[in-house]
Image (spheres, rainbow, N blue to C red):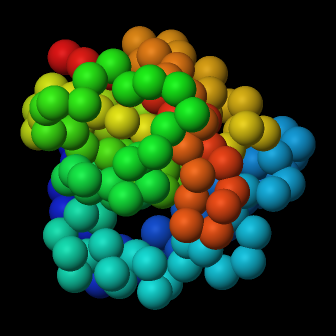
Amino acid sequence: MMVRPAAYSDLDTVLWLFSEAREIMRADGNIHQWEGPYPGEEQVRSDIELGVGRVVVHDGEVVAYFAIIPSPEPTYTYIDGTWLDDDLPYMVIHRIASSRTSKGVFREIIEYSFSLCGNIRIDTHRDNHIMQHVIAKAGFTYCGIIYLADGAERLAYQRLA
C-alpha cells in the first residue's frame, strides 16, 4: 500500500468510498454520522485544492481516502477533557473512508501521518464503534469531547510519536 495526494480523477472513487463507509456505519448501528451531503464532492474538491486530501492505493487501486490537516483545528480549541499537550503543532486526520475489502488501511494512514508530524489528533462519532476500536488499537489516548461548529459532539483522541 502507498499514500498519495488525491486528484480530481479520484473523485468518483472517493464518493463511492464515502457511500461504502456510510453503509458500513449504518449496518453497525451508527445511523447519525455522515448524514446528508457531508462529506461529498464539494468537500473532496476543497480538500484537493487545499492539498490535504489523500488516497491509499493498493495494487494500483484506490482503496481509501482521508484528509490530513495541519493545526490549528478550530473545533479542537475547546475540549471537555484534556489534550496530551497543547504546545506542539499537530495534524488532524478527518474523513476516513475505505472499501469493505481493504485491510490494514488505518495502519497505513497512521504510519503516513506520523511521517509528517509526531503529534496526531483524530475524532469520531460516539456511535462509530468500528472507528473507536481501530483508534484505540493504534495507540491513541482518549482525551475528551470536542464540539463541531453545529454543536454536535465527537470523541477526541491524540497520539504522540
Describe residue 21's horizontal placement relative to residue 27 as left or right: left
In the picture, residue 17 is in which quadrant?
Answer: bottom right
Look at the image and tell me in which quarter the N terminus lies: top left
Seen from the viewer's position, the closer of residues 22 and 35 is 35
* Residue 116, position as x, y percentages in the image: 11, 39
Q: Residue at image x 44%, y 24%?
A: 82
Q: Taking the image as drawn, is residue 113 in sight?
A: yes
Location of residue 148 with respect to 49 vertically, above or below: above
Q: Residue at image x 55%, y 78%?
A: 40
Q: Residue at image x 32%, y 46%?
A: 92
Location of residue 17 with respect to 99 vertically, above or below: below
Q: Taking the image as drawn, is residue 101 in sight?
A: no
* Residue 148, position as x, y percentages in the image: 57, 59
Seen from the viewer's position, the closer of residues 33 and 48 is 33
Describe residue 50's horizontal placement relative to residue 157 as left or right: left
Seen from the viewer's position, the closer of residues 5 and 137 is 137
* Residue 52, position as x, y percentages in the image: 24, 63
